[in-house]
Image: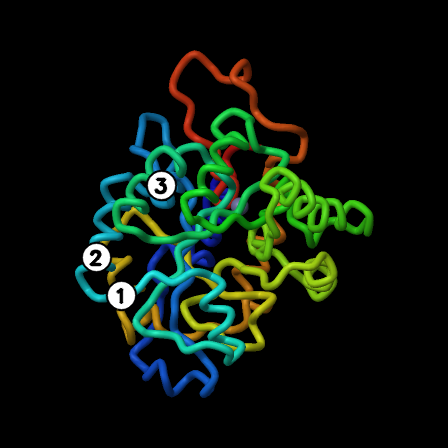
Amino acid sequence: MTGTRGAAALLLAATGLLPASGGGNGSPLGRCGADSIRVPILVYHNVAPHRMGETRTQTTADVRPETFEAQMAYLRDHGIAVVSLQQLVEALEGRAAMQEPAVVITFDDGWEDQYRHALPILRRFRYTATFFIITDAVGKDDYMTWDQVRELRNTGMTIGSHSRTHRALTNIHDGRLLDDEVAGSRRVLESELQAPIAFFAYPFGAQTPRVVAAVRDAGYRAARGFPGGVWNRAADIWTLRSVGVADDLPRFARMCAPRAGSAARRPPDVGEHPLVRLAVDLAPRVALLQDGFRTPSSRGPGPEPRQNADYQDHERH
Ligand SMILES: [Zn+2]
């Protein structure tokens, strides 16, 4: 158990939810090429009140609605624009100008609490966001229904794919299965929403050149990795770096403000970062959505912590 707890802490460090050790006072601009843009892609998971029985991971990674609202107010009050993922991609490609400071807001997994708690706040602030949906999970316990996903889209949100089952795609060696996760999920979304789907987010941020090629071949426009930091450049279109948001306003402020200390350091490429490698290696050991989804009948009598796919605690296998 100690080992898995340690691994979970490392995973958190890799995802940027724990403070990084070491310095970070160098000039961020000095570390980045001329084509780099510092528009953090923020990644949210559950947006819900904390409750009894949460793991430490959930306590850190789940964002309370009031914190989410305070974070949105911070952006407004500090003149930080919220731009769409498409706007960022076009700017990275040099086809559009990008105002800075700015952020992109994304939500992973399609949790129902995102619809219930985050959407009303986003609408009040008139902010747009991208929701990455696990298509096989739609309508299952704790996940949004198709009607809710459609409502997101109808209120100006962007819908992207987060695969069919949220497996680490790097562990799928059968080409047809990989295609089903990547292209199949896109087909499902396009059928349900009657609209083109442009963006993909890798489960766990796990990607290799083979997985990236599958995403390109499936007809997407760009893809988001996880994590990697706040900088992106044109070459990152298929592995966009991002940052996980924690239930922590000061940390959020440091991340979103331009030239913000350690958060502004550009880390090594995501796929090469040793801690990210560890996260990918751990992924298949985590009992995720691979054998179907939880149903209400699987719940115990007491309060059960939400299972957050990207931050699944490793105490539970
Ligand atoms: Zn996920």
Q: Is mark 3 within 8 Å of ligand 1?
A: no
Neighbour tally class for label 2: few under 14, some 14-19, many 20 plus, Cα within 10 Å: some
CA–CA distance in space, label 3 to label 2: 17 Å
Where is residue 257? Give x, y as percent.
26, 68
Identity of the residue drawn at 72% across and 56% down: 218
Residue 101 falls left or right of residue 227: left
Q: Which residue is mark 3?
A: 119
Any part of residue 214 in sight: yes
Q: Is residue 80 left or right of residue 56?
A: left
- Compared to residue 45, the image places residue 39 above or below, namely below
Q: Nearer the viewer, residue 105 or 83?
A: 83
Which mark is first along the chain, 2 or 3? Answer: 2
Task: Find numbered disc 3 in the image and state the secondary structure of the residue it sits on.
Answer: helix
- Locate the C terminus by quadrant: top right
In three-dimensional space, the C-alpha distance between marks 1 and 3, rounded to whole angstroms, equals: 19 Å
Q: Is residue 56 above or below residue 74?
A: above
The answer to whether the residue bearing label 1 lies less than 8 angstroms from the nearest atom of ligand 1 is no
- The residue that mark 1 highlights is 80
